[in-house]
Every structure is written in C-alpha cells, then in structure tokens.
C-alpha cells in the first residue's frame, strides 16, 4: 500500500463507547488511514447525543444508539449485546477484511461477528484494559472468574494482540499470549503556548507554584491527596481538567478554595500543561488496577517536559526506576515534600532536561511505526515481527 491511497483493506474498529473522540482510538485509526487502510469505527452511543454518522478526517464513524448509563454492573452486558447486534447491518453491507476489537467485550463481539463478513477476516485485539483486574472491585467473584478465563482463552483467537504498554505486554506473556506493545507515546510539543500567557489565559498568578492534573475524574483516580495539599498550602495553585463522576463533587469543594480550579473537560489541555510547574497522577493505592496503569499522563509529561508527581504505579514506576521524571509520594507529608522539591527552580529544570532527553525515544512516531509494521497488510498475510 502507498501512504494516502486508501485502497487497502477495509478495517472495522469495534468500540464500546461513543467515540467523541477517544485519544488512542483516534491516533491508531488515523495512522491506519494515512497508511492506506479504509477505516470505519463502529461505536456505541449510550446517550444518543452524537451524530449517527460523521467523518474524522479520512476515518468513517458510525454510532449505534442503545440508551444506557454507567454503573449498571453486569447488567450492562445486556445493553452491550444490543449495541453489537446493531453493528450487524453495517458489517453485512460492507464487510471488513480486518476487525479491530478495542478491549475484551469487543473481542468477543469480533469473534461472533466474523461469520457475518462471509469471509475469514483477520482479528486484531487492542487490549486497552485487563478486565479481570480492572473490574475486581465491581463485579461478583463468579463473574470475575469467568472474565479471567475469557481473558486467557479468547485473545488466542486473534491474529494480532496489541497492548498500550510493556507492563501489560508482560501480563499477557505470563499467560502465554504473545503481543506487541504500542505505547501511548506522544510527539514532543514544539509549539506549546508560553508559560506566562497560559497563566493569563487561565487567570492564574504568574509567580505561584502550579500543580496540574488533566485526565479522567472517575473514582479510581486518587485526587484526594491533591485536594488536601490545596487546603494545606493556599500559596500553591491546583488546576484540575477532565470529566467524570467526580467532577460535581470537585466543583463543590473548590467553591471554598481560591487556589483550586476545576476546568472541566478541555479538547486540548496544552494551555494547562504549559502553565504548570508540575503534573500529578495517582490511582487509589488500594485499587486492583494500580500496578497495571499505563496512563497518558506519563507520556504527556514527557512530551511537555513537565515534572510528574506520582505513586510509581504501572508504567510510571518502570520508567521512574530508570530516569528522573519527577517525585514519588506515598503519604500527604510525602506529597508536600515532593511539591516542595519540584518547586525549587534548579531541581525543576534538571527534571525537565531529563524528560526532554526521553523525547527522542518516547514519541508517537516510533510507536506508530511499530504498530503499522505489526498490523495485517492483507486478509491473508501478516507481519509476525515484534519489537
């Protein structure tokens, strides 16, 4: 295939969310489209608020509407099944040669929908999450055992398994499943907005120490230590950007704190990250998924050369063991100490230089090349190489 000719195989990406858009799905699908694949995203719109059909550049987006909401527990599977059934007419009319399944539920759907294509499609399993671990606090034990069994068996039916990081690749390798790591690396930000103008845009003091978190606001994210720091240190500014179930509570608590800013979801957090002296990321320490985290926040920190305060969880811990990417904490006192260290201009500049040195390795250009090299290039042939 020649880049840009888009005469290559049809790829259907099965996605159990609405795509508005998901960062990783967008980057992978755009990479495929640029490489000549004809890409269509089949996604589940649970709210009915988004267009049923649109284009994201060269990528076609089709949404099926099955109304539902989060926190249904195992009964959500019923609504998921209804959404998958609505994928069938699209697949029947224009059958794919490759089915790209995002996460375990969509992998099961891909296996079940393969006969609808009236051919033997290649199946790519994009293992965003490890469901047996991620849902351990949510589902009954019998269901978790069933999920664990599926997670050990069904990926073997895929022609290619990709993971968002090396820790997760090791998890699958321990279970005899070969995969290719395609990390969520980000290209260095060459034209980021200046620090001073970013602070003016956000209404922040130009001389204050600014700590930023940009990401999901679901209960697994441990933002309580950050809020506590804002209370203990009114001279420091805490900025939180994102959306999720914690947003309303965060806004309520920010009402009494002049140094706590809750910005909601931003299509591009560049202004927040450029304004910050340091970033923050932590999952709840008792969350079963903590040691498997592969957060975009880590690679955003590298791309922006922004020192990161963290708990050393998952991919962050692997990298922090080899490079000075910021400071780790394990208590409120440890967090205060980490902020104080990174607020020192000399320490901050040293960490930023270390992060800048990592940009030549941890960038999307390299991850994209690994992804395309491993991806099926036709219905019958596939590269077997992995990094």
Image (cartoon, rainbow, N blue to C red):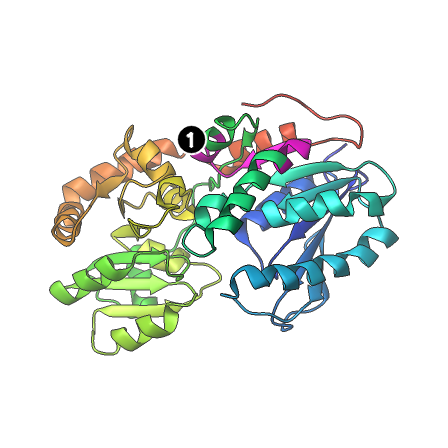
Q: Residue at x 65, y 22 (%)?
A: 384
Residue appearing at x 53%, y 52% in the figure: 23
Residue 243: give x, y in percent of width and height: 43, 65
Q: Is residue 337 above or below residue 252?
A: above
Asked whether residue 158 is in view, the answer is: no
Q: Residue at x 64, y 28 (%)?
A: 373
Q: Tell me the residue at 30%/56% (across/down).
A: 222
Q: Image quarter for residue 265?
A: bottom left
Q: Single out the residue that lies furthest toward the front.
A: 142
* Horizontal side of residue 177 vs 185, given as left or right: right
Indicate whether 267 appears above or below 373.
below
Q: Between 68 and 320, which is closer to the camera in this rendering?
A: 68
Question: What element does badge 1 sit on?
Answer: loop
Give whichever of 90, 230 is nearer the camera: 90
Where are the magenta residues, as a range?
154-169
| Residue behind mark 1 | 360
Q: Tell me which corner region of the image, top left, top right, bottom left or bottom right, holds residue 216.
A: bottom left
Q: Is residue 373 above or below residue 230?
A: above
């Amino acid at each position: 295939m020649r880049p840009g000719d888009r005469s290559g195989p049809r790829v259907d990406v099965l996605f159990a969310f609405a795509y508005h858009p998901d960062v990783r799905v967008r980057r992978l699908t755009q990479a495929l489209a640029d490489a000549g694949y004809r890409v269509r995203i089949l996604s589940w719109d649970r709210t009915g608020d988004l267009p049923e059909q649109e284009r994201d550049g060269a990528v076609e987006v089709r949404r099926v509407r099955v109304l539902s909401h989060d926190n249904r527990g195992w009964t959500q599977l019923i609504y998921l099944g209804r959404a998958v059934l609505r994928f069938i007419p699209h697949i029947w009319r224009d059958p794919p040669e490759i089915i790209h399944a995002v996460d375990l539920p969509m992998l099961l759907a891909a296996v079940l929908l393969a006969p609808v294509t009236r051919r033997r499609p290649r199946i790519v399993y994009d293992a965003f999450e490890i469901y047996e671990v991620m849902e351990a606090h949510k589902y009954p034990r019998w269901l978790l055992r069933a999920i664990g069994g599926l997670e050990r068996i069904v990926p073997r039916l895929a022609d290619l398994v990709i993971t968002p990081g090396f820790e997760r690749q090791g998890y699958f390798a321990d279970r005899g499943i070969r995969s290719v790591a395609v990390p969520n690396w980000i290209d260095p930000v060459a034209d980021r907005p200046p620090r001073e103008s970013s602070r003016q845009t956000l209404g922040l003091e130009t001389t204050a120490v600014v700590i930023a978190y940009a990401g999901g606001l679901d209960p697994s994210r441990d933002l309580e230590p950050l809020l506590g720091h804002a209370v203990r240190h009114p001279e420091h500014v805490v900025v939180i950007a994102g959306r999720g179930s914690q947003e309303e509570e965060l806004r309520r608590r920010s009402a009494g704190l002049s140094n706590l800013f809750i910005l909601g979801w931003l299509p591009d957090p560049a202004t927040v990250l450029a304004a910050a002296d340091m970033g923050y990321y932590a999952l709840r320490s008792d969350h079963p998924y903590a040691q498997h985290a592969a957060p975009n926040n880590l690679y955003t920190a590298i791309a922006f050369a922004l020192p990161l305060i963290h708990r050393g969880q998952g991919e962050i811990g692997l990298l922090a063991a080899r490079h000075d990417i910021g400071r780790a904490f394990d208590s409120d006192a440890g967090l205060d100490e980490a902020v104080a260290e990174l607020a020192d201009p000399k320490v901050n500049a040293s960490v930023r230089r270390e992060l800048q040195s990592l940009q030549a390795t941890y960038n999307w250009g390299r991850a994209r090349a690994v992804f395309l090299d491993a991806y099926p290039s036709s219905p019958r042939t596939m590269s077997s190489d992995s990094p």
